């Protein structure tokens, strides 16, 4: 398994996801969305695995201005704007190769073991 957890230190669900994998002795790479964000390829992979970019947007984000901008942009511009503003994404984003989840999803992660 090659687990990557994208989130922030302040996100409770991100911390719970990290604890989930730690308790099972599964190594993971933690990526801070505030500092690094996602690469174009990573975001594309997550979007394909989760069923579209709109599934990843967090309507409760603190950055409402960026969220509304992304939400109402034409489809072809949304992807690049999300890359510029990764804080509009739900957290955590957990990747395992081509599989990915958004939010705290321990039932799905158990199937990866």
Image (cartoon, rainbow, N blue to C red):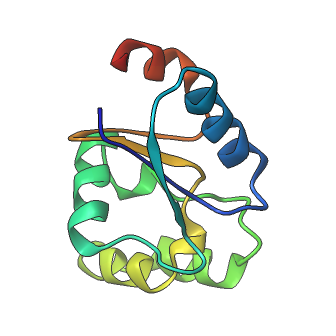
Name the foreground residue: 12 vs 59.
12
Is 38 displayed left or right of 32 in the figure? left
Name the foreground residue: 85 vs 99.
99
Q: Is residue 17 above or below residue 31?
A: above
Q: Quadrant of the C terminus?
A: top left
The location of residue 7, given as percent across then percent down, is: 59, 58
The location of residue 75, given as percent across then percent down, is: 29, 72
Q: Quadrant of the N terminus?
A: top left
Name the foreground residue: 71 vs 42.
42
Q: What's the residue at 43%, 76% (across, down)?
A: 82
The location of residue 77, given as percent across then percent down, is: 30, 82
Q: What's the residue at 74%, 55% (across, down)?
A: 11
Q: What's the residue at 55%, 70% (across, down)?
A: 33
What count of labels does the image hold?
A: 0
The location of residue 97, given as percent across then percent down, is: 23, 41
Q: Is residue 56 above or below residue 19?
A: below
Name the foreground residue: 30 vs 41.
30
- When asked about the image quadrant of residue 83, the answer is bottom left
- When asked about the image quadrant of residue 67, the answer is bottom right
Is 38 displayed left or right of 61 in the figure? left
Q: What's the residue at 63%, 23% (across, down)?
A: 23
């Amino acid at each position: 398994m090659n687990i990557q957890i994208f989130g922030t230190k302040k996100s409770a669900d991100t911390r719970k996801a990290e604890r989930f994998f730690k308790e099972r002795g599964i190594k993971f790479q933690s990526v801070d969305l505030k500092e690094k964000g996602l690469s174009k390829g990573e975001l594309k992979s997550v979007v394909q695995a989760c069923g579209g970019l709109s599934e990843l947007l967090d309507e409760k984000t603190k950055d409402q201005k960026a969220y509304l901008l992304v939400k109402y942009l034409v489809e072809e511009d949304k992807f690049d704007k999300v890359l510029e503003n990764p804080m509009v994404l739900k957290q955590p984003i957990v990747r395992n190769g081509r599989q990915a989840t958004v939010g705290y999803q321990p039932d799905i992660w158990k199937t990866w073991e």
